[in-house]
Image (cartoon, coloured by chain):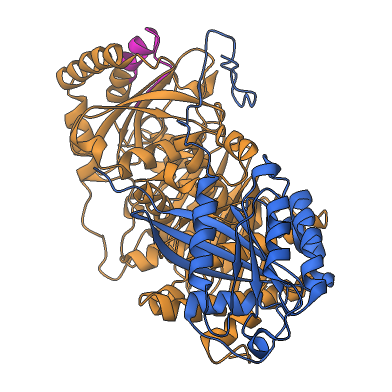
Amino acid sequence: MNGVAKSPVDVLIKCPCTGMKHEYLSVATRLKAALMHFSFASDVQDDTSASWRKRRKHFFVLSHSGKPIYSRYGDEHKLAGFSATLQAIISFVENGGDRIKFVRAGRHQVVFLVKGPIYLVCISCTEEPYEALRGQLELLYGQILVILTKSIDRCFVKNPKFDMAPLLGGTDAVFSSLIHSFSWNPATFLHAYTCLPLAYSTRQAAGAILQDVADSGVLFAILMCRHKVVSLVGAQKASLHPDDMLLLSNFILSTESFRTSEAFSPICLPHYNSMAFLYAYVHYLDVDTYLALLSTNSEGFYHLKECRIQIESVLVKSNVLCEVQKSILDGGLHVEDLPVDSSLRSGLPYPHPGQGRAAPSSMSEIGGPAGLWHFIYRSINLDQYVSSEFSSPLNSSGLHKRLYRAYQKLYVSMHDRQIGPHKTQFRRDENYVLLCWITQDFELYAAFDPLADKALAIKTCNRVCQWVRDLENEIFLFGGSPFSW
Amino acid sequence: MASRRRMLLKVIILGDSGVGKTSLMNQYVSKKFSNQYKATIGADFLTKEIQFEDRLFTLQIWDTAGQERFQSLGVAFYRGADCCVLVYDVNVAKSFDNLNNWREEFLIQASPSDPENFPFVVLGNKIDIDGGNSRVVSEKKAKAWCASKGNIPYFETSAKEGFNVEAAFQCIAKNALKNEPEEEIYLPDTIDVAGGNRQQRSSTGCEC
């Protein structure tokens, strides 16, 4: 084992973060030793450590003094030695007037993000690009701010010994749910949100009643179903960043107590104002659908409760909640429904999301036309995306995750700051044909059968865009959206 | 009632090379001792869980290298320490004389908010050697120095025999804890929309 050590005691003596003296290469070596050190030490201390080592993706948060704040796996306190190692590495490079971005050690990539007194680290062997992992650390940091605000920095200024972990007590589920979403929720790398498909009039009805309460002093009124937006309204000039929506909905969805009662909680939207709290009134209208009313008034509970009662009664009367449930059952866009010939569009009804799909026309055909398996369309102006439902042959969560990671890689390469941004990319490997097309209005990410014909695939992408435009009133949120200000 | 979270205490061990810092730590954490000298490179990190006054603590022990060439690592290591342990070898006068330098170096680099009352503990190690006959620093002298620096607690230890090690670390934990500031309620501001602070990405926060 790289001659590191045979007994735990040996390991203690030899271990890490030593020399990083002149070059970062040695940092990698040290880190490898540190990882190994940890494994040994925990073999002695902690019987779960064998499984800990096998984890493919670790996330750590620690303070600038090396005190552990969060670890995805394992007990932070048992990892105190490990987080000390991470701090020593980060601080050492910092003292040299430099900044450590990442370290590669064999198959592992260690990505660092320093946010003032808070250090975030991801150790991963998932082969995700640096930019993607860094983006995930940014979101993890954002989630900390959602719970505590950036005022937390003041505690470290006052007292460098400050132990932040207790302030995050009870929020483990929030972080693990966010980290899980990195592998299933494209919003985490697209920086856009997605809407539940609904008839235009239904969404309008929901928007109108939300607008009424926004006019009565509510800063943001958000109606969501799982992680999809039904409608949202902001007070004048207030705008909501898609990442804030992601972090807010993750916070709500992963906090069990919101489900059991109406709740009022301080909450920070980092892109809106990272230094201060807002107050969120959260209430589930049914098992999937919840309303979040955000106010600046810490004593606004009763007013917001009134608003909720009013909203709920309108939503029930106008049948919005039933439509929402129906939409969940029907699902979103299915690649099989992609209209075959766009020239026939005019005058003929084209399939709407989930509406009366016919059985696949031919048994041999899997997925959509021209071998289309899946797509994501991101509207740049709206900060919204729509993603097709997964269907055969992408029918396991492992395959979904693999495709999202491929999209994520595509996203990073398309937005490369040095050699990009690019307009189109066509990539064929043993798993798929991936096609990406970026214009000033939209970004399209599409996955095809690996044997798909290139010209046909491009043609199909055009049809997807046309289809999305034809359906835009149902799959996107227009007007009344704070983004239009 | 919810159980209180365990606290984590960061403890830095300083002293000349070869005085037995690593051995003390190993004796304390794993009850092991080796006569073989292996220089620490940079720093080693160890954790130990302890119980004190019915509460659980995790000691995060930073065992640093004594050689001068590692002194540049100081700032990176010392920040946010809860307690600093100064170790010397009772058989080596120079290691005792240097305690003053170690203490001052620590205070400069860690710049704790209240340097006068920052918790130190001094350990005179290797009292077992030669039955104490080769000893050159008397207990009295050591205690006098500790007294002059604001009554630093003093322990005579033998990492080899495990003598007084447990007691010394109990005291270290106690002192680290004593210095812990009263927990304040964490109370960030609320956004003040009326105060014209509703602009997106306002990083200043409100001053209310």
The chain drawn in orange is: A
Q: Is residue A385 found left or right of A427 in the rendered image?
A: left
The answer to whether one can see residue A191 in this image is: no
Percent position of residue B1, x then y: 23, 42
Quarter the C terminus of chain A occupies: top right
Q: Chain B's colour? A: blue
Residues A102 and A315: in front is A102
**Residue at point 66% right, 92% down?**
B36
Question: Does B42 appear above or below B161?
Answer: above
Task: Name the side, left or right, on which A47 lies relative to B25.
Answer: left
Task: Determine which quarter of the picture holds residue A183.
Answer: bottom left
Total residue callouts: 0
Q: Position of residue A311 (x, y in %)?
A: 24, 17
**A371 vs B30, nearest the viewer:** B30
Residue A143 higher or lower than A485, as above or below: below
Magenta segment, which residues? A207-222
Q: Is residue A243 above or below residue A482?
A: below
The percent coordinates of residue A99 (x first, y second) are 75, 55
x and y percentages locating residue A217 in the rendered image: 40, 9
Q: Is residue B107 left or right of residue B129?
A: right
Q: Nearer the viewer, residue A399 or A68?
A: A68
Residue located at (79% from left, 59% from top): B100
Q: Residue at x 41, y 14 (%)?
A: A297
Residue B114 falls in image quadrant: top right
Instruction: Indicate yes or no whether the magenta region holds residue A218.
Output: yes
